[in-house]
Amino acid sequence: MTERVKVLLVEDNPGDVDLIREQWQYSEIVCDLQVVPDGIDAMAYLHNEGEYAAASRPDLILLDINLPRMDGWEVLAELKDDPHLCRIPVAVLTSSEREEDVTRAYDMHASTYVCKPADLVGYGKIMSAIDGFWLSVVRYSVK
């Protein structure tokens, strides 16, 4: 892709947000990373409501499952039920390693499931993999 890749990060942990931002500083991909702290704000962003009226459609959503106000499962369900949003790839990025959560995410049509790493090196590997595949190779639907 030659234009800026738009990524929406739905994450309530400021430390994780900082680690992800830091890792993307080393990326060769020009990434427009937008961050919202919970599912309510994620849906407002995606529907261009309130303070997010001018938000642009993301090319990729990085979604934590354990969120306040509206959890990631609810966000994923709403996304996949909405004909205008259902084609946006969703990478679940969460601390849960439970097999039931992995299965549930794929059953709900998540594009991928990634467990949050314990350290900076692990975050570097994940962001590199996202850069290498989701932001460099994948072709996105514009509708």
Image (cartoon, helix red, strand yellow):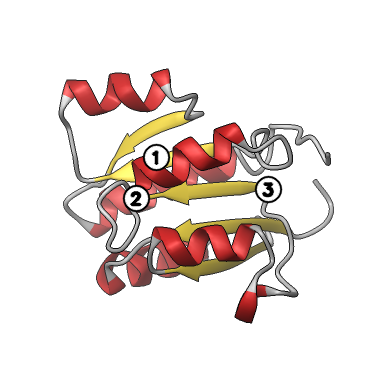
**Label 3 vs 1, first from the N-terminus:** 3
Identified by mark 1, the residue type is: Val
Disc 1 from disc 2: Cα separation: 6 Å
Residue that sits furthest to the bottom in the current view: 51
Of residues 24 and 83, the one drawn nearer to the viewer in this rendering: 83
Task: State which quadrant residue 69 falls in.
Answer: bottom left
Label 2 secondary element? loop
Label 3 secondary element? loop
Label 1 secondary element? strand
Of residues 104 and 98, the one drawn nearer to the viewer in this rendering: 104
Give the position of the C terminus as an image quadrant: top right
Q: Which residue is mark 1?
A: 92
Q: Is residue 128 above or below residue 27?
A: above
| Residue 27 in sight | no
| Residue 55 in sight | yes
Q: Is residue 8 above or below residue 35?
A: above
Circle number at residue 64: 2
Residue in the image at 39% along x and 69% along y: 37
Residue in the image at 34% along x and 36% along y: 114
Disc 3 from disc 1: Cα separation: 14 Å
Identified by mark 2, the residue type is: Asp
- Would residue 48 appear left or right of 104 to someone viewing this image? right
Circle number at residue 136: none
- Would residue 54 appear left or right of 28 to someone viewing this image? right
Q: Which residue is mark 3?
A: 59
Q: Disc 1, disc 2: CB below 8 Å?
A: yes
Residue in the image at 60% along x and 56% along y: 7
Q: Is residue 130 above or below residue 30?
A: above
